[in-house]
Image (cartoon, helix red, strand yellow):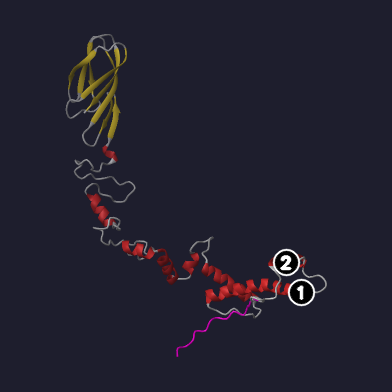
Amino acid sequence: MGEKTLMATNNFKPFSTGINANVIAQADYEALDALINGFQAGKASSAQINKALRQSTFVAAALAQFLVNKNGTDVLDNGDLNGFVTLLGNTFAKTYLSRSNPFADIKADGTAAVTAALANLGLDLALGAKAALGGSATQTFLVQSASSNTNAAVPVSLLNSGLASKAALAGSSGQDFAVAGGTASNSAVAYNQFTSGTNGNGAWTKLPGGGQWCRQNLTLAANATTTWTFPASFVAAPAVFITAINGAFQCWLNGIGPSNCGIYNNGSSLNVNLLAVW
């Protein structure tokens, strides 16, 4: 014969709960004057008294049974009010999540409680399938089947090796990108590879791939050739565009080289904007 498991004891019992209990109907009970002020004089019927006792003892017994079921401990009618209040508070804390400090109560219950909570949410499998977490601030993620799983965790070392062909990243806030080759359409380009400046001959801008433009505002002398020396020389003769600001446009290019161009004005003095592009 196996040993019997003893159930925890609940000393608080509901009163007058039988099928044929001598109690007045609920509607009659709610209509009693005594429901507000109590029985004042004369005699109360046994059915009225039984109803009042059942209302209070039923709730007390239910609450005590809740504590027994959740804790597996005895709830005794021993007059220990403070002990009962403590047991009640601990049971609610264990049963329901705190809303003022969410999940802190689970953490306080220890590792086993945290593990169980993660398992209930399905997070234990989700985390385990992607990376082994040791809890260190310098934790390295371990890839599992990264070649076939498109959402697998990827270590920083693999990301760095993929970026190495484009740029060397040192992690500094002032780090310059080191272009490797710089010929591919997706090669990394450093901000400081875009250069520009101004001088007495106008303004210039140079691009990393060899592109360049220069601009200037000039007044062309009447019926003469004006030479524009570019603010920065090109590798070869650029394309030059002329826009008249005022006056009749009667001018054309009269020779272009890497460092300058001539513009002949076949009319009166004319103010123009010049743009040279390579």
Give the quarter of the image for residue 91: bottom right
Relative to 216, does residue 66 appear above or below in the rendering? below
Left/right placement of residue 232 relative to residue 120 reads left
The residue tagged 2 is 28
The residue tagged 1 is 45
- The outermost residue toward the bottom is 1
Q: Is residue 8 magenta?
A: yes
Which amino acid type is shown beneath numbered disc 2? Asp
Which amino acid type is shown beneath numbered disc 1? Ser
Left/right placement of residue 112 relative to residue 79 reads left
The kind of secondary structure element at disc 1 is loop
Q: Which sits in the foreground, 57 or 176?
A: 57
Asked whether disc 1 touches disc 2, contact meaning CB atoms under 8 Å apart, the reply is no
Relative to 113, does residue 262 appear above or below in the rendering? above
Q: Is residue 121 magenta?
A: no
Q: Earlier in the sequence, mark 1 or mark 2?
A: 2
| Residue 131 visible in the current orientation | no
Give the quarter of the image for residue 83: bottom right
Q: Which sits in the foreground, 182 or 2?
A: 2
Q: Which residues are magenta?
A: 1-14
Mark 1 to mark 2 CA distance (whole Å) = 12 Å
Residue 124: mark = none
Give the quarter of the image for residue 84: bottom right
Question: Mark 1 packing: few (<14 Cα in 10 Å), some, or many (20+)?
Answer: few
